[in-house]
Image (cartoon, rainbow, N blue to C red):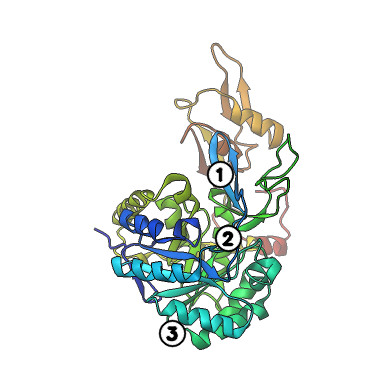
Amino acid sequence: MADISSNFLGIKSPNPFWLASAPPTDKKINVLRAFEAGWGGVVWKTLGSQVKNVSSRYSAVNYGGHKVMGFNNIELISDRPLDINLKEIRECIKLFPDRAMVVSLMADNDKNSWHELIKKVEDTGAHGFELNFGCPHGMTERGMGAAVGQDPEIAAMVVEWVMEAATIPVITKLTPNVHSVVPTAKAVAKAGSNGLSLINTIQSITGVDLDTFVPNPYVAGKSVYGGYCGPAVKPIALKMLTSIAQNPETNRLPISGIGGVSNWKDAVEFLLLGASNVQVCTAAMTHGFRIVEDMCEGLNNWMDEKGFKILEDFIGKSVPAITHWEDLDINYHHVANINQDKCIHCGLCYIACEDTSHQSISLQPGQPYNIYTIKEEECVGCNLCQLVCPVNECITMVEQRVAPEYINWVEWQKRGLPLNDH
């Protein structure tokens, strides 16, 4: 059986699944329940100056009959007294010494505050720190959270303060509320951060109540921008992760992947694109801690199937496949094919192609149902019909190269080839 144990910056855990810094890691009772369920580690909810949270705090986007496609929160860092948090962290480490205990931090914006907080947390026996440079609401007005992560110079300065005092690994959590995560990642890497984690939540408004006219979540007739997470943000998280994994100034640092990880397949995608482990929040909040059992089993089975013995065998394996558009092979072509034995004759493919694409599907009226077939000479291989088809593997994309040689857009232009030619 594959070995799914993880070693992130020397922080060992029985699997690569950590709970992210969030409500599920706010107190001892939650963390112990998580460890009992099998989570490999936790990032304790962010510690810093005392705050007061509001009510309500959460909202969500539902889509296609599925609840919580995206999750939004306006909750701040831990609102529990620091000494209680420190006491409970110490107790959790003692009860589960084989699990990773990383503590998220957001100190006031001066060196002494960071040094004092670091010393207090290190005294608990914690295995590492995660610097919260990503919180997009509430703390930014105080010059903290995303306000730090959005400015590479400030982020580097804070990391330098931290590295002066820290004797355990330091992970810097990046905000996605920027044009690119790379500049801040480069700055904190140069400043000495041992690792990175991303993404934090994305500023959002999930919707407006059409009766009260107030956006959600509702707080006495007002609302604010919240932090968006959950399955909806996974594509954004994967893109930002890959941009870090591809950059030679940042890809030397281990990365903890965050953003919409809901099952073992999501986790594998993050690892393939350069993450060394993953952090989970929304899925645990909506389904409970025991989802980690399926995550571990699924990862184990997949690794066995592919012949991977340890996580390092496939971490980053998909990164080289991400290239520039100008380097893509123009001579590579797809044509759709409809399996008539699987077709349920719903017509969704025809409607989508006829109304919004290339009119590449013919309709043959019939009794008792219509027949749909691909006009191969018109099909551009866009995949739309396959994406809207409700039946798995009914529509497949068949490779039909128009020429044996590889040619990219730059070479195509140099040769003066016609633009309307495949």
Residue shown at 59% from the left, 61% from the top:
76
Visible in this render: residue 257?
yes
Amino acid on which disc 2 is placed? Lys
Relative to 84, residue 291 above or below: above
Q: CA distance from mark 3 to mark 2?
A: 32 Å
Residue shown at 51% from the left, 42% from the top:
398
Visible in this render: residue 97?
no
Residue shown at 69% from the left, 54% from the top:
225
**Tag 3 near tag 1, CB within 8 Å:** no
Amino acid on which disc 1 is placed? Met
Select label 3 or label 2 by which is in front.
Answer: 3
Q: Position of residue 412 (x, y in %)?
A: 68, 60
Give me the disc on residue 167. 3
Give me the disc on residue 239. 2
Q: Is residue 165 left or right of residue 50?
A: left
Asked whether 326 or 322 is in front, the reply is 322
Q: Quadrant of residue 235?
A: bottom right
Q: Residues within 10 Å of mark 2 (few under 14, many from 20)?
A: some
Secondary structure, mark 3, is loop
**Residue identifier under label 1:** 69
